[in-house]
Structures are given as C-alpha cells and as structure tokens.
Image (cartoon, helix red, strand yellow):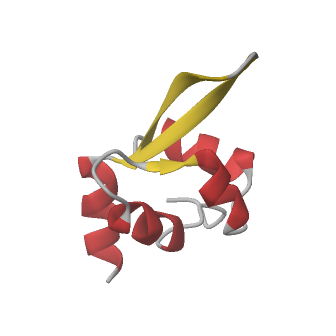
C-alpha cells in the first residue's frame, strides 16, 4: 500500500462508525482529503455511496463511506 494512504487512521475511524457508515463531511473534518478517500476507494478498502437529501426547497448529495472487508483485513495487518 502506498505511504500516501491515510491508513490505518482512516480505516480505524471508519471501522468505529455505525453499520450505516460515516459521512464524507466527518472524514474531511478529521483532516482527510478527497484525494485520499478516492485512493482508498480505488484500492478497495472503502466504499462510497451517494444519497440525495432534501431539506425544504434544497436538495444536495451526501456521500456515505464504509470500510470494506478488505479494509478490515488491511487494518488488522497493520496492528
């Protein structure tokens, strides 16, 4: 795994999230970049799903991130 992956910190955080996952916003608030999250997804360590949220007259997309089984295995191998 390339050293620019924020592993195991990102995987540790996602592993502690509830089954429904963590928001992209939470991960960004913890200092991860979109590029880091995309690379984790490309590596098969996390998945991302987009949901449409409507509040009043406003609609926006919310990305939910989840750790994959491969991500859990990679996390276990680091610790």
Percent of width and height locating residue 43: 47, 43
Percent of width and height locating residue 34: 72, 46
Count of labels in the image: 0
**Foreground residue, 49 or 42?**
49
**Foreground residue, 29 or 10?**
29
**Foreground residue, 57 or 71?**
57
Tell me: 74 left or right of 11: left
Residue at 39%, 46% in the rendered image:
66
Furthest toward the front, the residue is 56
Q: Quadrant of the C terminus?
A: bottom left
Residue at 61%, 58% in the rendered image:
26
Furthest toward the bottom, the residue is 79
The answer to whether 52 is drawn above or below residue 20 in the figure is: above
The answer to whether 65 is drawn above or below residue 6 in the figure is: above
Whether residue 43 appears in this view of the structure is no
The answer to whether 31 is drawn above or below residue 51 in the figure is: below
Tell me: 28 left or right of 65: right
Residue at 73%, 67% in the rendered image:
31
**Foreground residue, 24 or 53?**
53
Percent of width and height locating residue 6: 59, 66
Where residue 54 sits, quadrant-wise, is top right
Residue at 59%, 61% in the rendered image:
5
Whether residue 41 appears in this view of the structure is yes
């Amino acid at each position: 795994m390339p050293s620019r992956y924020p592993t195991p910190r990102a995987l540790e955080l996602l592993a502690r999230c509830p089954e429904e996952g963590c928001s992209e916003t939470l991960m960004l608030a913890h200092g991860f970049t979109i590029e880091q999250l995309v690379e984790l997804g490309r590596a098969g360590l996390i998945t991302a799903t987009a949901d449409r949220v409507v509040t009043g007259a406003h609609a926006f997309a919310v990305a939910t991130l989840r750790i994959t089984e491969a991500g859990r295995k990679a996390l276990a191998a680091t610790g």
